[in-house]
Image (tube, rainbow, N blue to C red):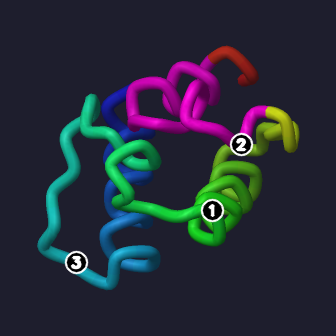
Amino acid sequence: MTNVIGQLTTFIANDILKQPSRSIAPDESLISSGLIDSFSLMDVALFVEDTFGVRIEDTELNAETFDNLTQLTDLIESRK
């Protein structure tokens, strides 16, 4: 699980936020805080699908499923 969170943190910090030194806590709000927007959410979903080989449904692209790294990791783990 921590490996998944690490990979997600690195991707979001480097590719989405363009702040490689930015740390993201596993329970930090991503969407509801405005850290990532709906366009970035699509990039995160594509990264998850390509990197972890899981399918993310369009209906899951929301704050209930994707609002923090713990939620997202739980989703990924449940699909492996």
Quadrant showing the C terminus = top right
> Image point 44% across, 39% down: which residue?
4
Up the image or down, 8 lies above or below 71; here it is: below
Q: Residues within 10 Å of mark 3 (few under 14, many from 20)?
A: some
The residue tagged 3 is 20
Q: Earlier in the sequence, mark 3 or mark 1?
A: 3
Look at the numbered discs 3 and 2 and tell me whether their residues touch, using CB distance below 8 Å: no
Q: Which residue is mark 2?
A: 61
Say whether disc 2 or disc 1 marks the residue closer to the N-terminus. Answer: 1
Query: Mark 2 and mark 1: span between their CA atoms?
Result: 9 Å
Mark 2: amino acid:
Leu
Q: Quadrant of residue 21?
A: bottom left
Location of residue 23 (image quadrant) = bottom left
Q: Which residues are magenta?
A: 60-77
Q: Position of residue 53 (x, y in %)?
A: 77, 44
Q: Is residue 65 one of those drawn in magenta? A: yes
Indicate yes or no whether the magenta region holds residue 73: yes
Instruction: Specify whether 64 is left or right of 71.
Output: right
Q: Which mark is residue 38?
A: 1
Label 1 near label 2: C-beta < 8 Å? yes
Tell which circle, 3 or 2, labels the residue nearer the N-terminal end.
Answer: 3
State the SS at label 2: loop
The x and y percentages for residue 5 are 37, 40
- Kind of residue indicated by mark 3: Pro
**Distance between the Cα atoms at labels 3 and 1?**
21 Å
